[in-house]
């Protein structure tokens, strides 16, 4: 028997509003609209299919404040994560959004209207407080704090949602279940107890042994429920991971396990996230939930220490056990015993017995170098899939992003790098010059800050796609803002797959030199006012905070600079 939903009722808004969806779609065609971000799209899907029950919309200020401060909705219901719809001030003013407004929420991929929100309030969040309370620190080393600082808009909109349709998916459709569908599946198979396993990483033999052991100890079945929405930047892409999951499911005892995909945008919020994950799995019908060591932790903070303690997540889930009404299964660290060819929990291995392990770092090294991966660690089909998607480093794509003032020498460096990489061979080489991916001569055009940011984001998208395909990409826009450069890096890391190797090079040639040697007279035109928003004249260039290399053509020659960049790539095993 499936677990009861959180709050007692599954809030399946798509099913609830099915009878009025046609009318809602007609209404949406005439409403002002908000095109959702990727995170907002994930959130909306789980709002409308019941995965976020008992929520029926994006949080208003009262619920948001209560969740941030107390891990509870304003009515006292346990819910640890703010689910918010952020919108820019310009958009609010343009659409005249106020309490009572009705807005269409559109899919960024195909512009389909997915829902209508009736606005309850528009409010300004305290993002520093949100970072400190929800993520434990206002530290940009945390990916969600960086997202909060760099991507989240200044205002939140709260309000209830009416569902028009679920988002369309074209990948792994047979593995995508709503909470109602998964509950129905459990009922059909007469599964009374279900142990859910959350993961954002590939699975290997130890994970299979852990989940099988957990199920057998509880006379239960296993739900492998991996996240295929937003995860941590740099994670293995979900296409590769799902192929791995499909391969490993064949290794489970017949009828024990089931694979279903979760379109969640993770926050990497450690303890709070563990409680949130437990609520979500409860809504999908699971009765048990495996909580790992440092569950949903993002790694090290800016001081080099873990953001969360190893058992903080388990402790918080235990604290709210009575309200969650889903049994926590503590993740047991498994180790391989060669003498008996089996995995055992580390704390159950007799003293003196030999054990073997391969760390995540070591696995990545073996994949990168082509070194063997023993069959005691993983399965042939899993290793084959990972090797196909993540070739050795010298076959992976990468992005060299040169930022600096106009006439700083970045274009000359970029062209010299292109020749050097072509000479070396082994990869296609793509050169993206100028401020617009479609026009290399675009530097002497007038741009607003927003236009320049959008153009650079297009360059980032193209760079990520090329790098994913194994190309060496050299991009050289001015990119004057730290926010823009960080977004470019995030795009490459998130979308570049095995080619998500990003190197930021600051061409720090002084403005005086750039202007004095400007043979085209572009700076002079900008100073006369013929070009508006020109960086270095009437627009600011923000010095990059974190770079892989700083160069300056007034103190270095071009061959020397190119050689230093080549050495940087060689140190990363990419050449």
Image (cartoon, rainbow, N blue to C red):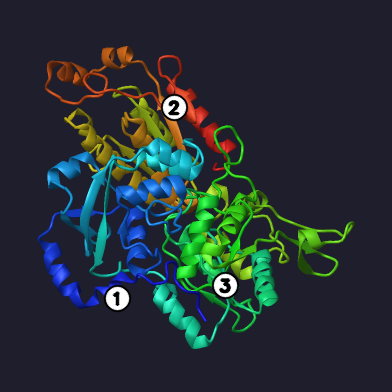
Q: CA distance from mark 2 to mark 1?
A: 49 Å
Q: Which numbered circle lies on residue 247?
A: 3
Secondary element type, mark 2: loop
Q: Earlier in the sequence, mark 2 or mark 3?
A: 3
What residue would you read off at disc 1? 15
Along the viewing direction, whichever of 219 and 376 lies nearer the viewer: 219
Q: CA distance from mark 1 to mark 3?
A: 33 Å
Q: Earlier in the sequence, mark 2 or mark 1?
A: 1
Report the residue at 44% width, 45% height from top. Answer: 69
Q: CA distance from mark 2 to mark 3?
A: 43 Å
Residue 217 against residue 378 in the figure, above or below: below
User: Given this view, does label 2 or label 3 mark the residue nearer the observer?
Assistant: 2
Secondary element type, mark 1: helix
User: Given this view, does label 2 or label 1 mark the residue nearer the observer?
Assistant: 1
Q: Position of residue 242 (x, y in %)?
A: 50, 67
Report the residue at 37% width, 31% height from top. Answer: 482
What residue would you read off at disc 2? 545
Along the viewing direction, whichever of 357 and 31 lies nearer the viewer: 31
Bin the neighbour count of mark 1 within 10 Å (Cα to Cα): few under 14, some 14-19, many 20 and up.
Answer: some
Secondary element type, mark 3: helix
Q: Earlier in the sequence, mark 1 or mark 3?
A: 1
Left or right: where 236 falls relative to 122: right
Badge count: 3
């Amino acid at each position: 028997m499936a677990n009861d939903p959180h709050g007692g009722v599954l809030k399946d808004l798509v099913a609830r509003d099915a009878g009025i969806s046609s009318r809602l779609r007609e209404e949406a065609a005439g409403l002002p609209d908000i095109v959702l971000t990727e995170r907002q799209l994930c959130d909306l899907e789980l709002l409308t299919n019941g995965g976020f029950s008992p929520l029926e919309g994006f949080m208003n200020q009262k619920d948001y404040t209560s969740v941030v401060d107390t891990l509870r909705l304003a009515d006292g219901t346990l819910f640890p994560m703010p689910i918010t719809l952020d919108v820019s001030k310009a958009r609010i003013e343009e659409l005249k959004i106020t309490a009572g407004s009705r807005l269409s929420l559109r899919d960024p991929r195909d512009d389909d209207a997915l829902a209508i929100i009736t606005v309850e309030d528009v409010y300004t969040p305290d993002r520093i407080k949100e970072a400190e309370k929800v993520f434990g620190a206002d530290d940009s080393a945390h990916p969600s704090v960086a997202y909060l600082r760099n991507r989240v808009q200044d205002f939140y909109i709260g309000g209830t949602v009416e569902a028009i349709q679920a988002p369309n998916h074209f990948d792994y459709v047979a593995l995508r279940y709503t909470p109602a569908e998964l509950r129905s599946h459990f009922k059909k198979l007469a599964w009374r107890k279900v142990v859910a396993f959350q993961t954002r990483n590939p699975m290997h033999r130890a994970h299979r042994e852990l989940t099988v052991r957990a199920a057998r100890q509880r006379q239960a079945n296993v739900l492998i429920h991996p996240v295929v929405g937003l995860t941590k930047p740099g994670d293995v892409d979900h296409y590769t991971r799902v192929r791995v999951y499909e391969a490993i499911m064949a290794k489970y005892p017949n009828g024990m396990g089931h694979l279903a995909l979760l379109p969640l945008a993770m926050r990497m919020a450690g303890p709070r996230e563990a409680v949130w994950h437990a609520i979500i799995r409860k809504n999908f019908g699971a009765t048990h939930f495996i909580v790992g060591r440092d569950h949903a932790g993002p790694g090290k903070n800016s001081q080099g220490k873990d953001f969360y303690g190893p058992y903080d997540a388990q402790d918080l889930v235990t604290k709210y056990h009575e309200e969650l009404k889903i049994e926590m299964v503590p993740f047991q660290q498994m180790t391989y015993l060669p003498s008996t060819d089996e995995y055992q929990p580390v704390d159950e291995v007799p003293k003196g017995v030999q054990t073997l392990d391969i760390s995540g770092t070591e696995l990545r090294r073996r994949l990168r170098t082509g070194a063997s991966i023993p069959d005691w660690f993983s399965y042939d089909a899993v290793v084959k899939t990972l090797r196909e998607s993540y070739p050795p480093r010298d076959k992976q794509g990468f992005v060299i992003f040169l930022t600096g003032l106009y006439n700083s020498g970045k274009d000359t460096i970029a062209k010299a790098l292109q020749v050097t990489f072509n000479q070396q061979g082994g990869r296609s080489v793509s050169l993206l010059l100028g401020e617009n991916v479609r026009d290399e001569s675009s530097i002497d055009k007038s741009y607003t800050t927003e236009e320049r940011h959008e153009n650079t984001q297009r360059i980032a998208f193209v760079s990520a796609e090329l790098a994913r395909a194994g190309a060496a990409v050299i991009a050289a826009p001015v990119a004057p803002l730290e926010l823009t450069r960080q977004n470019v890096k995030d795009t490459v890391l998130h979308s570049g797959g095995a080619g998500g190797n990003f190197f930021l090079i600051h061409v720090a040639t002084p403005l005086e030199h750039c202007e004095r040697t400007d043979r085209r007279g572009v700076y002079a035109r900008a100073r006369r006012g013929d070009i508006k928003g020109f960086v270095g004249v009437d627009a600011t260039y923000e010095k990059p905070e974190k770079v892989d290399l700083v160069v300056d053509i007034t103190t270095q020659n071009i061959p020397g600079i190119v050689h230093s960049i080549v050495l940087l790539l060689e140190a990363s095993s990419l050449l």
